[in-house]
Image: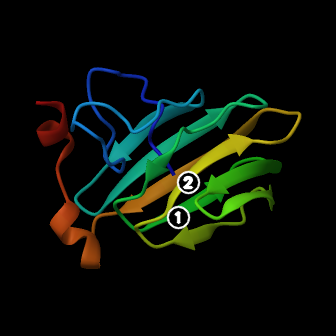
Amino acid sequence: MCTVANPDPSRTDPDVETDSGAAPVEQGSGNGRLVEETDTAIIWEWSFEPGQNTGWHRHLRDYAVVPLLDGRVRITDKTGTQISEMRRGVPYFREKGVEHDVANAGDAFFRFIEIEFKTGDNAADVATLAERTD
């Protein structure tokens, strides 16, 4: 989902296409934190106060999201906006290519884990963390 609001603005996030290769498409107000990167996956933790968002972005890899808390998110894409109820521990999967902005539509703090997959059809998109930060 999106690794748009980067705690380290000196580098771009791995699954966000950029206009110049140096900056996210749109900076969001949510907080994304890299938890771990392996040869096969990148794990992010996202946290949002009410109203905070990821910023508009495109996923370059297949990914799964696991909510850590119950909450509501507002998902805006090219077709419009929808509200989705998220349930703690109930994951979902999406294929690469998704473009959207995700915001906390609830009235309480919300957190989730996002896992980007670096295998299968995504293998051509793989870049190590060191390559992204050089």
- Report the front residue among 51 and 92: 51
Tag 2, which secondary structure?
strand
Depth order, front residue of 100/115: 100
> Mark 2 touching mark 1, by CB under 8 A?
no
Residue furthest to the front: 79
Q: Residue at x 63, y 58 (%)?
A: 66
Q: Which residue of the protein is positioned furthest toward the right in this rendering?
A: 107
- Does residue 89 appear left or right of residue 120 in this picture? right
Residue 14, placed above or below residue 117: above
Q: Badge 2 is on which residue?
A: 100
Neighbour tally class for label 1: few under 14, some 14-19, many 20 plus, Cα within 10 Å: some
User: Which quadrant of the view contains residue 48?
Assistant: top right
x, y percent for residue 77: 60, 57
- Horizontal side of 46 relative to 19 (left or right) equals right
Q: Which residue is mark 1?
A: 64
38 over 63 or under it: above or below: above
Residue 90 placement, left or right of 9: right
Near-viewer residue (90 or 48): 48
Residue 3 x/y as whole percent: 44, 42
Which residue is located at x 77 percent, y 47 percent?
Answer: 69
Q: Earlier in the sequence, mark 2 or mark 1?
A: 1
Placement of 42 over or under 131, stated as above or below: below
Circle 2: residue type: His
**Quadrant position of residue 21:** top left
- Give the x, y percent position of residue 127: 17, 52
Mark 1: secondary structure: strand
Label for residue 101?
none
- The quadrant of the picture occupied by the C terminus is top left
Q: Residues within 10 Å of mark 2 (few under 14, many from 20)?
A: many
Residue type pointed to by label 1: Ala
